[in-house]
Amino acid sequence: MSRAATERKCILRLENISLAFEDDSKVLDNVNLEMWAGETKIILGAAGAGKTVMFKIALGLLKPTSGRIYLFGQDVTDFGENQWFEVRSHVGVLFQEGGLFDSLTIEENVAYPLVNRSNQTAEQAHPAVKEALEFVELGHTLGKFPSELSGGMRRRVGIARAGISDPALLLYDSPTAGLDPITANNIMALIIQEREMRNATSAIISHRFQDGHIMANFRYNPESKRLERIPDDSPLRKSTRFVVMRDGRIVFEGSEAELDASSDPYISKFSMQRSAH
Amino acid sequence: MLDILKSPIVTFQEFILLAGRATTNIVRRPFYGSDVILQMDTIGVGSLPITILIGFFSGAVMALQMSRALSQYGATGQVGQITAITLVREMGPVLTALLVAGRNASGIASELGSMKVTEQIDAMRALGTDPIKKLVTPRLIATCFTLPLLTIVADFIGIIGGYLIAVPLMALTTSSQYWNNAWRSLEYNDIAQGLLKPLVFAFIISLVGCLYGIRTTGGTQGVGRATTQAVVVASVWIFVCTFLITRVFVNI
């Protein structure tokens, strides 16, 4: 396939990305990653493996020492901050702890992308904000502040904010970290719903294999309003790919079955989590 | 040797870059007017009671100290002049700036530092807002506007404090002589440096607070460190700058 044809469908491409600190310690070492339209990437790795750094580089929040970044088919590596603002408006982001603004109410937080980017007034944004918050079952929290909500609720508000501007790419950084299993599964169910409602390309950073397993094997049924197992022959199964990172390098990329079959002790640790839980 | 110098030079460079970006943002859209008003309320109105308090006592203590020194020369009538000149030229601006540095440089550093460690600043950038425009510029404008006003209040209250000591309490001079002396002794040179200093200090306080806040690393411990550093660095630069400005004005 020609490069031009490849770029049409390629949402995000990281090419030979490296990031080193002044003391020459490498945080990312020659990372290559491609995300295609409609694809879901599960990025697994131990703490300090470079997952969040890679995510921030993809968003232009950190500058790589070397390598190229392509987003939506254009080379954005050397973009200035103002050019990045335009690119980032097509990306929805959930930060590790939600990244909500403490000084703003939940309504103002969720409305922020609309008010800030589309120049809508708070009143114009209100119906969309209410709908987004009702989607994450937090329609009653409009006037509250983030500090009044639990960790799981803040994460759900973050999901509502990430999806409100209908982005083409959704990035979730550790959406389930530090949450109990029930809340974590609810969060993953919301992410699956969002993926299917918006038909967006998604990347989920996690250290829990279960998150990836749910994304790879379940889909949302709007009629029964429940998650159901994806049939074995569905093309949806092939769209979920796993990436494993270790010490700033990508050491594995493939399907869930390939991850299960890996004999590498580090990689197989992630698939073994399933049997441990 | 070079390694020791590297860190302060890099910090100074970051300060200059931040100052440049924050200042040019003043004339660039979008304008965050409500943030500026909010910061003026926090920095200006919030610091007013304590400014009045320290202004009053600094004037009073100045009159007390001078009463003894001036009586040796039989010049107690000059107490109004000395209180006014010392307050307007030096003590009003410096004490008010130190107070605002302790109260607001630390507040700014801890607020922005907490936002940094909880990824709110990254979230802001990801959602299309320039954090310097949204967070730094309003604090710079608000401090530059309110600190000179606070200094004027501190100067005036200080002269009243000096009056209460010199006239009703110690009867060093008469009321009309005190006010006459205080008024006549102040020249344009004194007023100019008394108003230029708070403007420069406002720049230092707001930008040092913002710089240390924005570059916070290392979780909540880092926020504490940033707060302390902001107050110490702002206070030291206030003294350095007051010396430099006074040096220039002495020759005018």
Image (cartoon, coloured by chain):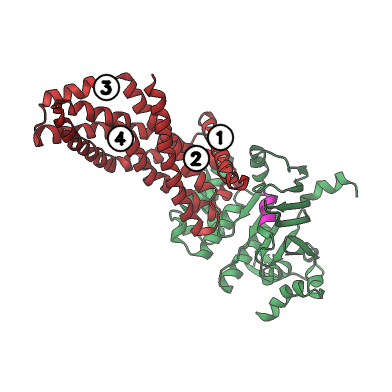
**From what the image shows, is residue B173 above or below residue B105?**
above
- Are there few (<14), some (14-19), or many (20+) residues within 10 Å of tag 1? some
Residues shaded magenta: A53-59
Mark 4–mark 1 Cα distance, whole angstroms, equals 31 Å
Q: Are marks 2 and 1 in contact (CB under 8 Å)?
A: yes
Residue sitting at the far front: B72
- Are there few (<14), some (14-19), or many (20+) residues within 10 Å of tag 2? many
What percent of the width, then of the height, locates residue A117? 59, 41
Instruction: Look at the image and give the colour of chain B.
Output: red
What percent of the width, then of the height, locates residue A245? 73, 64
Instruction: Look at the image and give the colour of chain A.
Output: green
**Residue A103 visible, this orientation:** no
Residue sitting at the far bottom: A276
Q: Nearer the viewer, mark 4 or mark 1?
A: 4
Q: Amino acid at mark 3?
A: Leu
Mark 2–mark 1 Cα distance, whole angstroms, equals 9 Å
A142 left or right of A41?
A: left
Q: Nearer the viewer, residue A223 or A141?
A: A141
The mark nearer the N terminus, 4 or 3, is: 4
The mark nearer the N terminus, 1 or 3, is: 1
Q: Nearer the viewer, residue A250 or B53?
A: B53
Which residue has dot 4 on it?
B91
Q: Which mark is residue B186?
A: 3
A270 left or right of B65?
A: right
Q: Nearer the viewer, mark 1 or mark 3?
A: 3
Q: Write the residue at 51% across / 56% down.
A: B222
Which residue has dot 2 on it?
B136
Circles 2 and 3 on the same chain? yes
The secondary structure type at the circle numbered 4 is helix
